[in-house]
Image: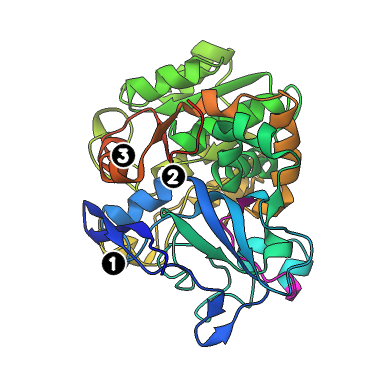
Amino acid sequence: MASNRGLAYISPGVVEVRSIDYPKLALGARKCEHGVILKIISTNICGSDQHMVRGRTTAPEGLILGHEITGQVIEAGRDVEFIRVGDIVSVPFNIACGRCRNCKEGKTGICLNVNPARPGAAYGYVDMGGWVGGQAEYVMVPYADFNLLKFPDPDQAMEKIRDLTLLSDIFPTGFHGAVSAGVGPGATVYVAGAGPVGLACAHSCQLLGAAVVIVGDMIPERLAQAASFGCETIDLRKDASIEDQLEAILGVREVDFAVDCVGFEARGHGHAHVHEQPATVLNTVMSITRAGGGIGIPGLYVTGDPGGVDDNAKIGMLGIRIGLGWAKSHYFVTGQCPVMRYHRQLMMAILYDKVQIAKAVNVQVISLDEGPKGYHDFDKGAATKYVIDPHQMIPA
């Protein structure tokens, strides 16, 4: 029987490579004829994986990580009509049936049929349906005709795989944050967080025509990465207020739109930057976004956080100054990005050289065995998007 290996969450701060079952075209005891098995070409470490690895979720020991998957089809169920063996495909991190009310409305991040516990599912993520993760050598993908994005030319796909691998999550997620906030030509935008999603969002704002994109973070290397492709930056360790720093850049103390790419592990600003304050980003973006402006929130917020700073934070109840947002007539968009809403358009932008997303997020290719070190370095603030190459298929 064919073998398989994957990256498993063991305990807070500990990830290891384990031998795991080779995937089958099955859902429990039932045959999965609408699914395919992929030989994984690339699978990326995501900031939301880090929440689990830090012990900030209820993820169980042994969970196989990974929801950012690109691969080659090596087996297809008999009900798969339009995807063929040999195709190279991007896998949206949202698992969606294509049949329920939400999927038919394009809300594939909250499919009603793929997770018995709640709407929405993802590969290798806690409380998201129990689907095996894709930081592995092989993985099974259900509802293949609906979910998968086939790249038109396999050779071209391999040439641009460092960019195309980002279509499974962070590029659409960053783009969704920008679009849902309302970013368009001539806009001024503040992006909170210069991790991979924040950098992808900043580059997306540029693609959408923003006049000025300002990125805030506490890690100098990440701010330098944002500046490398034309963003203005704010060092959140400084005691100067964000309004003062905005005024130094724009001449005014507010922006048109803001995007929270940090989520529930947010820290305070200035001298308080060493302390976790989970509502900081949400309150900050309300303060600095103009009246009538929009706020996109692709940053992850959870309903269960064992490491929360207080009892309220442990159940996702944060001290958000919602009255300020109401008074300024802000609109907010939360929740998982529905990847399929954007991935084909973003693929075309990559294939026709309209974006350089791999350069923007500083992709670094590593082996599966280097995965635990990638998690360690990413957790320390590396200004890098780690892309795992389980079969050494990615060209140098």
Q: Secondary structure at mark 2?
A: loop
Q: Main secondary structure of the magenta part?
A: loop
* Label 3 neighbour load within 10 Å: few <14, some 14-19, many 20+: many
Stretch of the chain drawn in magenta: 90-101
Q: Amino acid at mark 3?
A: Gly
Residue 158 falls in image quadrant: top right
The label shown at residue 79 is none
**Figure coloring:** rainbow
* Label 1 neighbour load within 10 Å: few <14, some 14-19, many 20+: some
2 and 3 marks in contact (CB < 8 Å): no
Residue 128 pos. (x, y %): 48, 69
**Of the image marks 3 and 1, the number of the one nearer the N terminus:** 1
The residue positioned 40% from the left and 63% from the top of the image is 317
Which residue is denoted by mark 2 in the rendering?
A: 391
Would residue 255 be visible to someone looking at this image?
no
3 and 1 marks in contact (CB < 8 Å): no
- Mark 2 to mark 3: distance in Å? 17 Å
Q: In the visual, does 212 lie left or right of 53? A: right
Residue 244 falls in image quadrant: top left
Residue 246 pos. (x, y %): 51, 19
Residue 135 pos. (x, y %): 41, 53
Which residue is denoted by mark 3 in the rendering?
A: 374
Residue 119 falls in image quadrant: bottom right
Relative to 18, does residue 246 appear above or below in the rendering? above
Is 36 part of what is drawn in magenta? no
| Quadrant location, the N terminus | bottom left
- Along the viewing direction, whichever of 298 and 196 lies nearer the viewer: 196
The residue positioned 76% from the left and 25% from the top of the image is 185
Q: Amino acid at mark 2?
A: His
Which residue is denoted by mark 1 in the rendering?
A: 62
Q: Amino acid at mark 1?
A: Gly
